[in-house]
Image (spheres, helix red, strand yellow):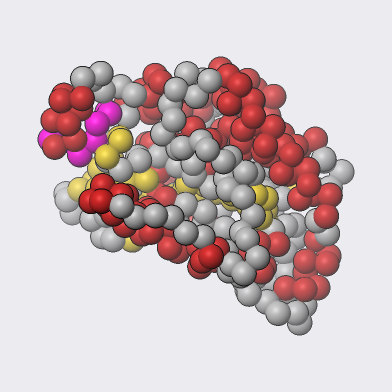
Amino acid sequence: MNGYADLVLEGGGVKGIALVGAIAEMEARGYRLGAPARVAGTSAGAIVGSMLAAGMPVPDMVRVMRELDYRSFQDGSRFALVRGLSLLTTLGMHRGDALHRWISARLKECGIETWGQLKLRDPDSALPPGHAYRLVVVVSDISSGRMVCLPWDYERYGLNADDQSVADAVRASASIPVFFRPCRIGRGDGRKCVQVDGGMLSNYPITIFDREDREPRWPTFGVKLSARPPAGGVFRQWRGVRGPIGYGRALVQTMAEAHDRVQMDEPSIVARTIFAHTGGVLATDFDLDAATRDRLYAAGRKAAGEFLDRWNHHDYLDTYRRGGPLQRPVTSG
């Protein structure tokens, strides 16, 4: 038995099945995921992370994600003109209601509806009460231009975190801009804030559990849905920019990835990241076939296995905590 591990899951739309593969391999290797350890995620990472934090058994999670028909989440018109009008009037081609109903049902099956049911009860934890939850999901609040971590930041809206819906937060985190309608959350003063996919500001919030005041009781692992950065850093990557559409896409991708790309230059971040290569699959490939799902799941398991074969928590602490070239501290509650 390897003990507990906190987990941070990257967003990636339909590629989320690879996250489940990594989780399955970690559990098979003896890691205990879930309370009293924590999980955080963005978008697809929030979806998978919420089921894990809710206590869904990993075999059930594998089955649920393999059986999921992603096309059902495209709950907008099949006519391009109507989708275009929906984008103009509601800021999204698809309602996102089907996604909300699906994750709400999965969480209810585990007995979870509100954040109060995900309170972390760990007498050995030094976490402040407002951070003592099994799950954290990342959302981009474009009304205030900031990254929001739920349930931690509900107080900024004048809301009681324990009374809020977990499914609502996950739906907000998975609100892919343009594809899904954004979510709106009311503030105590009556105004509403617009929330979209957390990946706009941090698709891979690997430092979310980091602290400097104590040595970790267990490691924090991250699962990233991409290949390992090339030698020399991620900035050696290149993509062509052609025409106004390509230019707009490159601008959005650069804004969405800038924060996380800087982090991947830090050796301490790379050292605790599982890189599941999902090459060729886009986050919005909702027509994913069974063979591709199996390939993604296998990629997640393989990546986690290779990572754990070389992982040594004590070596990590010696290198990045105990007088070594610390880039980011890694500490669990």
| Viewer-nearest residue: 255 or 52 | 255
Residue 322 coordinates in the image, percent (x, y): 77, 77
Which quadrant: the C terminus? bottom right
Residue 91 inside the magenta-drawn segment: yes
At 26% from the left and 23% from the top, the residue drawn is 76
Q: Is residue 25 left or right of residue 115?
A: right
Give the farthest residue toward the bottom.
323
Q: Tell me which residue sits at (38%, 59%) in the image.
A: 254
**In the rendered view, does 107 fall on the left or right side of 157?**
right
**Residue 98 vertical position relative to residue 185 in the rendered view, above or below:** above
Q: Position of residue 328 (x, y in %)?
A: 62, 71
For the record, the magenta segment spans: 89-95
Viewer-proximal residue among 83 and 218: 83
Question: Quadrant location of residue 181?
Answer: top left
Q: Quadrant of residue 162?
A: top left
* 77 part of magenta stretch: no
Query: Quick check: 197 above or below 78?
Result: below
Residue occupying image coordinates x 58% and y 19%: 290
Is residue 169 visible to us here? no
Q: Position of residue 23 (x, y in %)?
A: 68, 38
Please tell me how many numbered marks the rendered image carries. 0
Q: Tell me if 73 is positioned left or right of 300 in this view.
A: left
Q: Is 189 left or right of 216, judged from the image as shown?
A: left
On the question of residue 218 being in view, the answer is yes
Which is nearer the eye, 102 or 67? Answer: 67
- Residue 171 position, x and y percent, is 38, 36
Q: Which quadrant is the N terminus positioned in? A: top right
Which of the two residues, 238 or 200, is positioned nearer the viewer here?
A: 238
Name which residue lies at 58% across and 32% down: 17
